[in-house]
Amino acid sequence: MSSERLWVQPGMNVFGADGEYVGQVKQVRERDFVVSRPRHRDIAIPRDAVREALTSEQRLELGISSKEVDQMGWENEPTNPPAGHLPSGQETIAEGRRVADLMVQALDVVSPDQAVRTAQTRLGGEARLSLIVVEGERPVGIVRWREIMGLAGEDAERPVREFMVREFPHLTPSQTITEALAHLNEFEDQLSGIDYLPVVDEEERLVGEIPAMALAHAEQRAVVVEEAADLGLRSGMTVVGAAGKKLGTVSELIRDTMTGELAGFVVAHGLLGRKHKRLTPEVIDRVEGDTVVLKIDAREFNLLTDIEAQS
């Protein structure tokens, strides 16, 4: 089985072989991953228990049924720091990062009065799980693929407002990652099936969106920042996404002028490498030889603004 099929990421939904929902990946470790379950204690599932990982659908399928999961002895409390806690010495790094650092442009939204069929087309075309519903300039809901995927005929002509989630978190660019995670915890299971969250200004107007996966990675990213200097990054290395697709090449390293530590790197991409995106070390999952593997996939990479567009 290819590494892509066994790719496990925080935020993925876990299902048993019987198709029943088990929980959501909260943390990924070397040999297992921690799964948060509704109304149950967290469990640590071994990687070899995964039958298939459907990256585009953010879905993991186990080789056993959901009922058998409770019989495997995985229910013991995992030896992980509590949710929202970072290893000693790394709190400052996490607290210094803000929602604005992970925010991307909201390229596609839907209005509450548009037909469900329109949302179906957009979700299918973008391979997304949800769309932000905007009235005027303000987000008023989120429509999820799972609520509308089976609608057809006259039902598909009904307005999006009849199916949208009306209670959802509103994040702001100035919020720290720690504050954003604490805010998300207030919604718990209501965020299931939502892959992008709205970011608003002081007047509640939509200014962007943030991949839920990016926030799910936030606790682990502080560790990457600390180890960035030892990654061996250099110009000319091939950059690939989480699913293994080539995204471009490293064209420049950016170091802190005071400490000399790696602060970011530039990826040349597009036709003849004429376009460039600046990334932070936190998006790096690992370096294998001359290849840099990112935690984000090609879709998330393409949503990042090119440097030229910022000048």
Image (cartoon, rainbow, N blue to C red):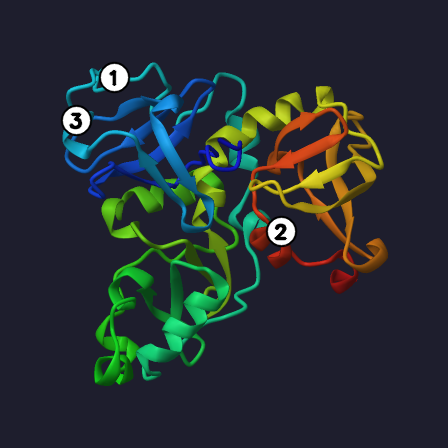
On the image, the x and y values in percent for residue 129 come to 38, 58
x, y percent for residue 230: 72, 19
Tell me the crowding category of disc 3: few under 14, some 14 to 19, or many 20 or more residues within 10 angstroms, Cα based.
Answer: few
| SS type, badge 1 | loop
Q: Is residue 148 above or below residue 296?
A: below
Residue at image position (60%, 58%) is 303
Are discs 3 and 1 less than 8 Å apart at CB?
no
The first of marks 2 and 1 along the sequence is 1
Q: CA distance from mark 3 to mark 2?
A: 37 Å
Residue at x 39%, y 79% (from the top left corner): 118
The residue singled out by tag 1 in the image is 77
Q: Which residue is mark 2?
A: 301
> Closer to us: mark 3 or mark 1?
3
How many other residues sit within 10 Å of disc 2, few (<14), some (14-19) or many (≥20)?
A: some
Which residue sits at x=22%, y=76%? Answer: 162
Q: Nearer the viewer, mark 2 or mark 1?
A: 2
Residue 68 is tagged as: 3
Q: For mark 3, give the secondary structure.
A: helix
Is 202 above or below relative to 185? below
Q: Earlier in the sequence, mark 3 or mark 1?
A: 3
CB-based contact (under 8 Å), mark 2 and mark 1 = no
The kind of residue on which mark 1 rests is Glu
Report the side of 244 relative to 122 (left or right): right
Q: What residue is drawn where x is 64% and y is 34%?
A: 293
Q: Earlier in the sequence, mark 3 or mark 2?
A: 3
Please tell me whether residue 130 is drawn above or below residue 37 in the rendered image.
below
Foreground residue, 225 or 304? Answer: 304
Eye-nearest disc, 3 or 2: 3
- Residue 271 point in image, percent of width and height: 81, 60
Between 217 and 17, the one nearer to me in the picture: 17
